[in-house]
Image (cartoon, rainbow, N blue to C red):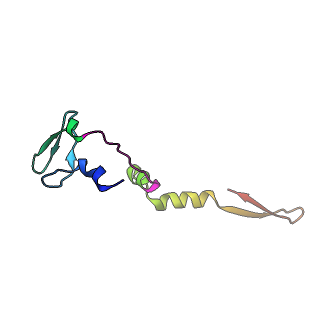
Amino acid sequence: MGCRQRDFMFCEMCGTMLSFNSPVKVTCSVCSHQKLIKDIGPAEIRYTLTAEDIRRELGVSALEVFEEEKELKQIVSVVCVMYFHKLNSGL
């Protein structure tokens, strides 16, 4: 995605990100410059979410997730009292 494809999101006068609050026009919150949405033309908007973005949005730290995964993956070694075989079992 080149820079020109993202230019429609920023004010032509001051460079501030435009506010798309109206279905008819976009407005700059700094200099109040307005532009009709029909003048912007068709634009495909894509974004990517990462696991970190989702954790941040939910208020979960990566350390908490790591600790939970660590607890789930623990393996306990148990010795069979009858035959003295070593058995591994998950908690």
Residue at x 31% of width, y 42% of height: 43
Quick one: 23 or 36, which is closer to the camera?
36
The percent position of residue 7, horizontal first and vertical second, equals 25, 51
Residue 59 vertical position relative to residue 43 in the rendered view, above or below:
below
Q: State which quadrant residue 89 falls in.
A: bottom right
Q: Is residue 50 left or right of residue 31?
A: right
Q: What residue span does the magenta drawing correspond to?
A: 41-52
Residue farthest along the right direction in this orientation? 83
Q: Is residue 65 left or right of residue 35?
A: right
**Could you tell me what secondary structure mostly forms the magenta stretch?**
loop
The percent position of residue 62, horizontal first and vertical second, equals 46, 60
Quadrant holding the C terminus: bottom right
Quick one: 78 or 29, which is closer to the camera?
29
Residue at x 48% of width, y 62% of height: 63
The percent position of residue 37, horizontal first and vertical second, equals 21, 37
The percent position of residue 64, horizontal first and vertical second, equals 48, 59
Q: Is residue 88 left or right of residue 27?
A: right
Q: Is residue 70 magenta?
A: no
Residue at x 38% of width, y 49% of height: 47
Q: Is residue 43 magenta?
A: yes
Residue farthest along the top direction in this orientation? 23
Q: How many marks?
A: 0
